Image (cartoon, rainbow, N blue to C red):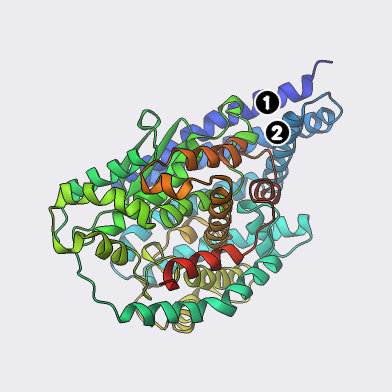
């Protein structure tokens, strides 16, 4: 039997993939290389490309091909690909072209202005652009919720984490809230009694860049298929064949850029190892943003902040910045594992990080569901920062509610992925330790290949073949639980 309808779909999605490739690289260029004067024209070009992709994906022929392909003789992988095609079609078909274009334009305008407004602590200038983004995001959420029968926020959450609901998130986060504040306080109190030597800067940008490249090499990044650059907000973009990592440098801070690069390298390794035999098809995409974040946090926190990895990177630090008392192994490990309450999410340690995410989750859910308005954000942010982290952000918009890029382009529903990712990462690392009896010895010797091989076999090579739950159950033997995250934090920060 010739699967004509399925073949028509694969050709269409291959075409869409190529347009997405162009869009991704143009978006990276906009963030990393483009001069400020190109913003409006680039935004309009990307909006035009988004409309074209939307037109192709929502063509009436797609619906008929999807229905007919269900009756064709397909393999299990082809059926999984067809499932992901149908999901992509139904997600797109709900939205009118005009909304797709308006969202793209408003998001690009808001993000570009945010770069300057954040530096200037200019909430009054930022708020009008954000209000337009929120208005359009609410319109999208309403359309999606009416189709799904769920809440407006859940309709956006499902874009990033298919199958996840705020009801399940509330259960997971309620568990975190029951033990994390006490654990955070205990760790902070414990660390207050130690004496650390802080590394003495400055740390020249070029040397930091060389160190980041060294870390990427140690972690297996393929430089034939990617590169490292600078942007206002660190990110990993591009496509699996051409992955673009960005970071930002502060010559008074050694760790921020280094661990930012390690974090983005986790994203990049996942992208670079997605199933190439399915390139251009939805099954070859990363499973979800929670799984994507699990890989970046696996690299940054589970591996990168471990004593085993820090021991391997320390000689490269001394080579570039010179020997100093702070660079004894015990001091450097302790310094790299410092836990403290801070304002900035991307610089937060792994113990306090979930508080940053839960704060954002609670605000963005209320915003999309219409329970609060944009003007309420600064006050709520300050209130929740004091509740969760004991810090005031009153009047400090730059380090408060303006610090993240996600809301500027309407990425509502994304933030939970970070803490879901931390939970997935801890659970995956524990499963890898069980499967690889010599793992700790390998890591101490700087041999990361067995660990990466396990990740490739259990996560990377599967793309979107399985649902998130199926992927995690297959890899670890059970569905997501916060238990391993708690065990990991307790072992690393409270064991003697």
How many numbered markers are drawn?
A: 2
Circle 2 sits on which residue?
A: 81
Give the left or right position of residue 367, taking residue 61 as reference: left
Who is closer to the viewer here, 100 or 295? Answer: 295
Q: Secondary structure at mark 2?
A: helix
Give the left or right position of residue 192, taking residue 363 as reference: left
Who is closer to the viewer here, 61 or 487? Answer: 487
Residue, far right: 71
Who is closer to the viewer here, 160 or 466? Answer: 466
- The answer, for residue 235, to whether it is visible in the render is no
Residue 202, x across and y down, in percent:
14, 59
Residue 402, x across and y down, in percent:
40, 67
Residue 99, x across and y down, in percent:
61, 50
Of the two numbered discs 2 and 1 on the same chain, state the one appearing first in sequence.
Answer: 1
To which quarter of the image does residue 280 belong?
top right
| Number of the label disc, if any, that sits on residue 420 | none
Instruction: Please name the residue shown 71% across and 68% down the image.
Output: 167
Q: Give neighbour class at mark 1: few <14, some 14-19, many 20+ (Cα, 10 Å).
A: many
Circle 1 sits on which residue?
A: 10
Q: Nearer the viewer, mark 2 or mark 1?
A: 2
Q: How far apart are labels 2 and 1 at the CA level? A: 9 Å
- Are discs 2 and 1 less than 8 Å apart at CB? yes
To which quarter of the image does residue 27 belong?
top left
């Amino acid at each position: 039997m010739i699967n004509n309808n399925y073949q028509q779909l694969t050709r269409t999605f291959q075409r869409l993939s190529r347009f997405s490739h162009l869009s991704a690289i143009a978006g990276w260029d906009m963030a990393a290389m483009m001069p400020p004067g190109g913003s409006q024209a680039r935004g309009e070009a990307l909006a035009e490309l988004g409309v074209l992709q939307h037109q192709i994906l929502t063509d009436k022929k797609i619906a008929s091909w999807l229905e007919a392909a269900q009756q064709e003789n397909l393999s299990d992988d082809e059926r999984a690909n067809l499932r992901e095609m149908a999901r992509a079609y139904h997600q797109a078909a709900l939205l009118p072209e005009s909304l797709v274009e308006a969202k793209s334009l408003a998001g690009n305008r808001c993000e570009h202005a945010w770069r300057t407004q954040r530096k200037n602590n200019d909430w009054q200038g930022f708020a009008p652009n954000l209000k337009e983004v929120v208005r359009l995001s609410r319109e999208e959420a309403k359309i999606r919720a009416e189709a799904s029968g769920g809440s407006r926020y859940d309709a956006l959450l499902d874009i990033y984490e298919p199958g996840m609901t705020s009801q399940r998130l509330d259960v997971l986060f309620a568990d975190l809230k029951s033990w994390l504040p006490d654990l955070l306080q205990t760790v902070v109190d414990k660390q207050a009694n130690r004496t650390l030597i802080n590394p003495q800067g400055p740390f020249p940008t070029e040397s930091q860049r060389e160190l980041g490249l060294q870390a990427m090499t140690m972690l297996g990044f393929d430089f034939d298929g990617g590169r490292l650059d600078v942007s206002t907000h660190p990110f990993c973009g591009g496509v699996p064949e051409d992955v673009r990592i960005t970071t930002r440098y502060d010559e008074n801070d050694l760790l921020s850029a280094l661990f930012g690069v390690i974090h983005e390298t986790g994203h990049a390794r996942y992208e670079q190892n997605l199933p190439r035999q399915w390139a251009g098809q939805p099954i070859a995409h990363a499973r979800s943003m929670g799984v994507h974040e699990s890989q970046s946090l696996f690299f940054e926190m589970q591996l990168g902040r471990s004593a085993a990895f820090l021991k391997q990177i320390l000689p490269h630090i001394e080579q570039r910045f010179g020997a100093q008392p702070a660079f004894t192994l015990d001091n450097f490990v302790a310094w790299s594992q410092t836990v403290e309450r801070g304002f900035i999410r991307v610089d937060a340690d792994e113990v306090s990080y979930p508080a940053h995410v839960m704060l954002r989750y609670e605000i963005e859910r209320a915003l999309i569901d219409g329970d609060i308005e944009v003007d309420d954000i600064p006050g709520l942010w300050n209130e929740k920062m004091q509740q969760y982290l004991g810090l005031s952000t009153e009047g400090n918009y730059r380090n408060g509610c303006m610090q993240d890029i996600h809301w500027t382009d309407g990425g509502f529903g994304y933030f939970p992925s970070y803490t879901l990712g931390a939970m997935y990462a801890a659970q995956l690392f524990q499963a890898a330790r069980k499967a690889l009896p010599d793992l700790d010895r390998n890591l101490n010797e700087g041999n990361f290949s067995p660990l990466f091989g396990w990740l490739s076999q259990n996560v990377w090579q599967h793309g979107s073949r399985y649902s998130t739950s199926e992927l995690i159950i297959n890899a670890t033997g059970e569905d997501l639980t916060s238990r391993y995250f708690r065990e990991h934090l307790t072992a690393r920060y409270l064991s003697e």
